[in-house]
């Protein structure tokens, strides 16, 4: 159990490694899901194209959305996008960088699914079998077949167990032809996605290196600030609950509390309890009322402090807005210059 806890803490502290691992698992899951998927073409002219294209398009969209769902930065992006401006302006470049970073990871599993599907060729064969040219794969000595019957016959090409038109169309030749086109499309798709990924990952930072570093830095800052704020709120909530429970037991203890206090005083426990109590009160950061905590949380969402940590420009919330600390403690200075 300790090993799993340490591993989970490591993954939490290394968010990028964790998300890369999730993307790798999703990619393997997509390949495994396709191998376990039972492909059943309807073999009907009205449904072959819809079924084949659905197998090619719908699972990648699902994997893409699942990648966003499993990414913890989605909530960070939504919070940063929807928050009021306050004293901290919103940088659209940072929001675009965060979205593009999540989208790149979420696209791994869909790209793998589309590649595997095209390489296998079953969905492509099912979708485009009706559009085959009968003159290329047909038997010229066979009698003429009406167009409607020919479409129904071509729709059965992917289904070897129900195909009954060997005298009209060579099923093996048509299957090989469509699978060859499907594999060619798969390799072209892989080449295109690899080339685009190369352009995005390698060439883009070379032309906009300063902007790239700035957006990367502030996107990491937004994520780290949110985590530290949640950790601070968690520590405050623990200290708040501990002090409340301690005061509750002290107020309802009665004689047992008096006896315990006398015994700990004899053992020197007053000093230890006093130190613990003082430590817990220090963690409260001066916020000891529920309404004050609600105001702090509301002001954090409504008016975050500016990204300026100089002492004279530190910002704190008061009431419903933000004021500068320098404005509250400003002093007047008069300088005299001598011309002698």
Image (tube, rainbow, N blue to C red):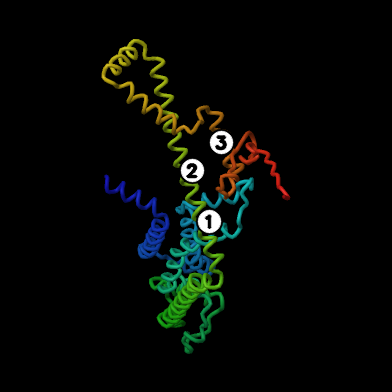
Is 285 located above or below residue 121 in the figure?
A: above
Residue sitting nearer the eye, 190 or 95: 95
Task: Give whichever of discs 2 and 1 has the lower sequence position.
Answer: 1
Extreme residue in the right direction: 339
Residue beneath the point at 47% across and 89% down: 141
Is 276 located above or below residue 2 in the figure?
A: above
Residue 165 showing in the rendered view: no
- Mark 2 falls on what kind of element? helix
Extreme residue in the top direction: 255
Residue sitting nearer the eye, 291 or 55: 291
Residue 187 shown left or right of residue 320 in the figure? left
Residue 46 percent across, percent down from the top left: 54, 67
Residue beneath the point at 43% across and 36% down: 235
Task: Give whichever of discs 1 and 3 has the lower sequence position.
Answer: 1
Residue 173 percent across, percent down from the top left: 42, 83
Q: Residue 218 carries which label?
A: 1
Q: Which mark is residue 296?
A: 3
Task: Give whichever of discs 3 and 2 has the lower sequence position.
Answer: 2
Residue sitting nearer the eye, 129 or 93: 93
Assess whether mark 2 and mark 3 are in contact (beta carbons under 8 angstroms): no
């Amino acid at each position: 159990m300790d090993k799993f806890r340490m591993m989970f803490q490591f993954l939490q502290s290394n968010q990028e490694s964790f998300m890369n691992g999730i993307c790798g698992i999703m990619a393997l899951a997509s390949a495994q899901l396709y191998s376990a998927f039972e492909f059943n073409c309807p073999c009907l002219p009205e449904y072959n194209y819809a079924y084949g294209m659905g197998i090619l398009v719908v699972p990648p969209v699902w994997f893409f959305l699942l990648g966003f769902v499993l990414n913890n930065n989605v909530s960070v992006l939504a919070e940063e996008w929807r928050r009021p401006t306050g004293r901290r302006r919103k940088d659209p470049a940072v929001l675009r960088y965060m979205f593009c970073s999540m989208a790149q990871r979420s696209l791994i599993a869909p790209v793998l699914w589309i590649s595997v599907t095209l390489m296998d060729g079953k969905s492509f064969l099912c979708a485009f079998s009706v559009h085959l040219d009968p003159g290329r794969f047909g038997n010229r000595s066979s009698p003429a077949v009406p167009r409607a019957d020919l479409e129904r016959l071509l729709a059965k090409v992917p289904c070897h167990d129900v195909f009954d038109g060997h005298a009209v169309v060579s099923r093996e030749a048509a299957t090989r032809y469509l699978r060859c086109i499907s594999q060619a499309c798969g390799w072209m798709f892989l080449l295109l996605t690899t080339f685009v990924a190369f352009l995005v990952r390698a060439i883009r930072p070379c032309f906009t290196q300063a902007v790239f570093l700035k957006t990367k830095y502030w996107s990491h800052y937004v994520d780290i600030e949110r985590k530290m704020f949640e950790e601070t709120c968690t520590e405050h909530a623990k200290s708040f609950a501990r002090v409340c429970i301690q005061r509750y037991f002290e107020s309802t203890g009665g004689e047992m509390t008096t006896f315990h206090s006398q015994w700990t005083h004899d053992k020197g426990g007053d000093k230890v309890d006093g130190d613990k109590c003082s430590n817990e009160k220090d963690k409260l950061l001066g916020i000891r009322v529920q309404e004050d905590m609600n105001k702090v949380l509301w002001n954090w969402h409504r008016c975050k402090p500016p990204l300026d940590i100089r002492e004279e420009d530190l910002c704190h919330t008061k009431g419903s807005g933000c004021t500068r600390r320098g404005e509250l403690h400003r002093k007047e200075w008069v300088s005299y210059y001598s011309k002698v």
